[in-house]
Each structure stands twice: as structure tokens, then as C-alpha cells.
Image (tube, grey):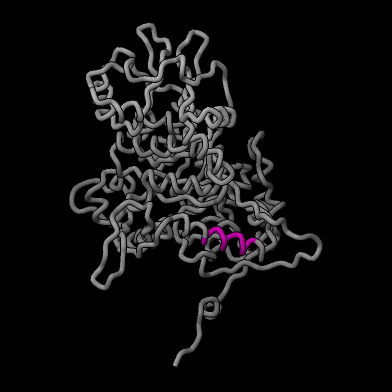
């Protein structure tokens, strides 16, 4: 019956969508989830079935690439949660450099969030499209004051004359060795005759090679009229080229960036501020299929048609389908599975995560919508990652797995017993609701009185650099896919089969040695 219903939905779906038909999904997997439609499962309830593959070996490198949204790719399916104890720019940079993505949380003020997003986007910016310039007649102390007022972390500027023409280059070295701050920039700069420039468009590799040949750190690109059109930076060009095979970068070699926004008019205002640096906006709500979520999605897509918008969180396939029809470019699945979330016990709602992800994935496939599902929350063991992918997730959003790392916000604290820890809290915790307007919006905490908390606070062990945690997650995922004979994430979603296990089966899955 389920297969007939899905077939009818496919025939009636709008044309022109790229999709994976339900007929390509393993019949066993379809039967597994349809056999008891009133049973909902989570990660500890299931295991993946291994396969024999005597005919052809798997490729040496398993393909773990996918998408976070319709147009934003991932080289590894790992995304950091938009939580104030998990993701600011440091985490966003580290995640994208590893091949994933970080979602900057919305608990920051609009300008602060923009600054964090900008730091991620410009961390690997090999070419500056609109370089900041200084005048040859400016005094050194004036330029240094401008740098301080704007919190510029660089001291290299193309120098122009009164007509706007390039006349020289001033660098950090020029400022460092200037003993008289009343001098003009013209007196300390490298004049155009000695500067290395080009007057044609170059690729990043070409610019890198020219700067390496001449041992210079900057390369101004001049227009036909003598003005500065672009500026290449050697440090960034080298970093991009050296790490391009691993980092998750856009067409300009810059790290992909994402940011959470609330489900109200502030979302539009925030995106207006961040649009020059933002690749995907994450419409972040505990009630992702509310009237306000749909209305905000409509407004964002109307004003920013070329910007991907991911919406969440929901846990029903019917909600995911409606959001896809409304224009969502990706959908976050998970209401209450997180380690510090109490939504389910406080409100009684929430679909266990394996069933929630599958229901959403299968409904989108039946509706012929080719947009990614993001499994958000509930990952406790490394094997859960592979299970989430096998039931339909193209990306895995993690909070507790990444909390406590060097890149997570907050100071490392040393306890009395010498244990080092960091703070980790749910965005629906009492303290987050009290301190953050974004948290109150996310959880709909309006009206008078004390808001209902839907999360807790905790201390988690300090784990060191997040790259080490991600490397372990990556090894576990690849090893699982090899057991299941899945050469890429798509094959894992379509063909890997599941079994339901019992309580004793779960106990058997964990170490159970008897000690005396």
C-alpha cells in the first residue's frame, strides 16, 4: 500500500525537479519502515546490515561529499550546530577547512554576527575585489588611526593620488620602520615604479606564481584607467592552494559560510547585513513548520532569490514536504533528540530521530524534491553518523560531539581534580532563554512569567582541536560504509539495509566484559 501511495505521489508531482525515485531505494529498506508505521525508532534501536561484494572492489577512497543545501556543497557531511557554546567564527573556519560547515549562532547581535560570518568568509580570501586604498597625501598617523577605528587586522594598502590612480603600495613593514608618524604615505610607500603589478585578469594560481617569483606578498591588479581593481594576497593564495583539496571553498577559493536567523522580520534585516559574506541562511526554530517559519521563508526567498535558505527544525515528513514546496533549499530534522534538550519530556512531542529522518527523506523523494535532509541532534556514538546517512541524511549537524573543543566558544576551566572542561548549554536552557533574545524567539518564549526551559546546561570534557574529533568521526563513517559496501553517501542512502535490535542486542553492541 505504501509503495502504491508513493507511486501516485510521484506521478502527480510537479515537473522539472531532479530526484531519486523511490524505486531505486532498497525494497528491504522500504519494507522495514512500512511494516510497522506506528513504531518510531532511534539510533540505539537499529543496526546496519553488512554486505558481501565478491564481484568488484570498492574504490580506495570512499566519496563522502554531499550538500548542506541545494547549492552549498560539503566535502564531508559534518556541520556544527548554531549554538552559543558551539559555533562562532573559530568553529566555522575549522569546520569549513576540514570540508564541512559551521552555522554561526543567532544569539549574537546583528553586527556581531555579521562580523563573525565575515571572518569565516574572508579567512581564505586570495583576492580582494574591492581593496581599501589610502591617499598618498594621508599622514601615517591618520592611516593607523583609521585601522584602529575599523579594527583592521591588516596594514597593506594600495596608494592612490588625487585622481584615483595607483601610485604605490604601503605595507606592514613600511609602518613598522616609520619613526616619524607625521610623514605622508607617499614618503614611506613603495612607488609604482618598484611595485609588482599586473593589468590583466589572473587566476589564483597565476597570481600565486608571480608573487612567489618576485618574493612579494601582494599583487595589485590595475584597470586600463590606472585604478586598482583587485588585490591578490600571497599568504591567502598559498593557503587556499595548499588546502584546496580538503577545504570546503566556493568558486573564489573562500570558505563556505552559514548563519542562523530567527523566524521573524529580524531575519531579513540580518541577512541584509550579512549577504555579501553569506552562502546559506538557516531559518532556526524549534517549531520549524509554524506559520512564522513559512512566512519568514517566503520573505527571505522573495528578497534574496539567489541565497540558499535551510529551514528547521521539524520531525514529520509531511512538514518537510510542505517546506520544500514553499521553497526551502534544505531541511533540518530533529525535535528534542539533542543531549541537552528537554523538549520531549517537557512537551511530550518529538519523533525519534531514525524514523524522523527517514520519514522526511522518503516524503521528499516521493514528492520529487532533490534537496538535502540534515539530521540535527541525537548523535551519541560514532556509528550513529552512518545510521543517519543510511536513513536519508545528507549532512549531520552536531552539538555535543563538538562542544568542549578548542574552537568552541568559552574558556577552558580546570576543576579541583585537575579535569579540564568547557561549558555547554542548550539554546532552550534557562540561562540561554534569560540571556538571549534569539533563544526566546527560537523556542517561542513569549508572554509574562518565567519561560518554560527546553534544555539544560552542562560541563563537558575539554577535547582539544575539533579537527581531531572530526577525523575520528570521518574514520568511523568510512569504515561503516566499507562494511556496508557503499562507495558514496548516495549509495549508502539508497541501498544500505537496516535491522531492528532488542535490548539485549543493544547491550551486546557495547563492551560487556565481566570483571571480578
Which residue is located at x 48 percent, y 39 percent? 255
Was residue 33 drawn as part of the magenta stretch in this picture?
A: no
Residue 318 visible, this orientation: no
For the view shown, which residue lies furthest in the right direction? 55
Image x and y of residue 405, in percent: 38, 57
Residue 330 visible, this orientation: yes
**Can you say whether 126 is above or below 421 in the image?**
above
Image x and y of residue 206, in percent: 59, 28
Image quadrant for the C terminus?
bottom left
Which residue is located at x 43 percent, y 13 percent? 166
**Can you say whether 457 is above or below 91 in the image?**
below
Q: Is residue 322 left or right of residue 87?
A: right
**Can you say whether 440 is above or below 221 in the image?**
below
User: 79 or 137, which lies in front?
Assistant: 137
For the view shown, which residue lies furthest in the bottom direction? 516
Which residue is located at x 23 percent, y 48 percent? 435
Was residue 473 drawn as part of the magenta stretch in this picture?
A: yes
User: 75 or 36, which lies in front?
Assistant: 75
Q: In the figure, residue 171 lies in which quadrant?
A: top left
Q: Main secondary structure of the magenta part?
A: helix
Instruction: Provide the residue span drawn in magenta.
Output: 472-481
User: 422 or 274, which lies in front?
Assistant: 422
Amino acid at each position: 500500500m505504501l509503495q502504491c501511495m508513493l507511486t501516485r505521489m510521484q506521478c502527480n508531482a510537479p515537473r522539472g525537479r531532479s530526484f531519486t525515485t523511490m524505486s531505486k531505494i532498497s525494497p528491504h529498506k522500504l519494507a522495514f519502515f512500512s511494516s510497522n508505521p506506528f513504531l518510531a525508532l532511534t539510533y540505539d534501536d537499529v543496526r546496519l546490515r553488512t554486505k558481501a561484494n565478491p564481484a568488484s572492489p570498492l574504490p580506495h577512497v570512499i566519496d563522502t561529499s554531499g550538500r548542506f543545501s541545494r547549492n552549498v556543497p560539503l566535502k564531508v557531511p559534518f556541520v556544527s550546530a548554531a549554538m552559543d557554546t558551539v559555533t562562532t567564527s573559530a568553529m566555522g573556519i575549522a569546520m569549513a577547512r576540514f570540508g564541512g560547515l559551521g552555522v554561526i549562532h543567532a544569539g549574537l547581535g546583528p553586527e556581531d554576527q555579521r562580523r563573525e560570518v565575515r571572518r569565516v568568509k574572508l579567512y581564505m580570501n586570495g583576492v580582494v575585489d574591492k581593496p581599501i586604498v589610502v591617499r598618498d597625501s594621508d599622514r601615517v598617523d591618520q592611516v593607523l588611526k583609521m585601522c584602529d577605528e575599523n579594527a583592521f587586522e591588516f596594514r597593506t594598502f594600495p596608494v592612490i593620488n588625487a585622481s584615483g590612480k595607483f601610485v604605490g603600495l604601503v605595507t606592514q613593514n613600511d609602518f613598522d620602520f616609520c619613526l616619524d608618524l607625521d610623514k605622508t604615505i607617499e614618503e614611506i610607500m613603495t612607488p609604482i615604479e618598484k611595485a609588482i603589478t599586473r593589468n590583466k585578469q589572473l587566476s589564483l594560481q597565476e597570481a600565486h606564481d608571480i608573487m612567489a617569483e618576485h618574493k612579494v606578498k601582494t599583487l595589485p591588479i590595475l584597470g586600463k584607467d590606472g585604478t586598482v581593481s583587485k588585490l591578490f594576497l600571497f599568504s591567502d593564495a598559498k593557503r587556499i592552494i595548499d588546502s584546496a583539496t580538503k577545504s570546503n571553498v566556493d568558486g573564489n577559493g573562500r570558505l563556505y559560510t552559514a548563519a542562523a536567523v530567527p523566524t521573524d522580520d529580524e531575519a531579513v534585516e540580518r541577512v541584509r547585513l550579512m549577504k555579501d559574506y553569506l552562502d546559506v541562511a538557516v531559518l532556526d526554530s524549534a517549531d520549524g513548520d509554524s506559520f512564522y517559519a513559512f512566512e519568514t521563508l517566503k520573505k527571505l526567498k522573495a528578497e534574496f532569490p539567489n541565497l540558499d535558505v535551510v529551514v528547521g527544525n521539524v520531525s514529520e515528513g509531511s512538514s518537510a514536504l510542505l517546506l520544500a514546496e514553499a521553497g526551502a533549499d534544505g531541511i533540518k530534522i530533529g525535535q528534542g533528540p539533542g543531549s541537552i534538550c528537554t523538549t520531549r519530556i517537557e512537551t511530550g512531542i518529538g519523533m525519534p530521530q531514525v524514523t524522523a529522518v527517514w520519514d522526511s527523506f522518503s516524503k521528499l523523494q516521493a514528492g520529487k524534491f532533490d534537496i538535502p535532509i540534515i539530521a540535527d541532534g541525537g548523535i551519541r556514538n560514532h556509528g550513529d553518523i552512518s545510521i543517519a546517512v543510511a536513513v536519508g541524511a545528507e549532512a549531520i549537524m552536531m552539538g555535543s560531539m563538538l562542544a568542549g573543543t578548542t574552537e568552541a566558544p568559552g574558556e577552558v576551566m580546570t576543576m579541583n581534580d585537575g579535569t579540564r572542561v568547557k561549558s555547554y548549554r542548550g539554546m532552550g536552557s534557562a540561562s540561554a532563554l534569560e540571556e538571549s533574545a534569539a533563544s526566546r524567539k527560537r523556542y517561542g518564549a513569549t508572554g509574562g512569567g518565567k519561560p518554560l526551559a527546553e534544555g539544560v546546561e552542562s560541563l563537558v570534557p575539554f577535547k582539544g582541536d575539533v579537527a581531531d574529533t572530526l577525523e575520528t568521526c570521518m574514520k568511523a563513517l568510512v569504515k561503516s560504509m566499507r562494511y556496508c559496501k557503499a562507495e558514496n553517501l548516495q549509495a549508502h542512502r539508497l541501498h544500505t539495509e537496516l535491522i531492528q535490535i532488542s535490548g539485549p542486542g543493544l547491550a551486546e553492541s557495547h563492551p560487556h566484559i565481566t570483571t571480578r
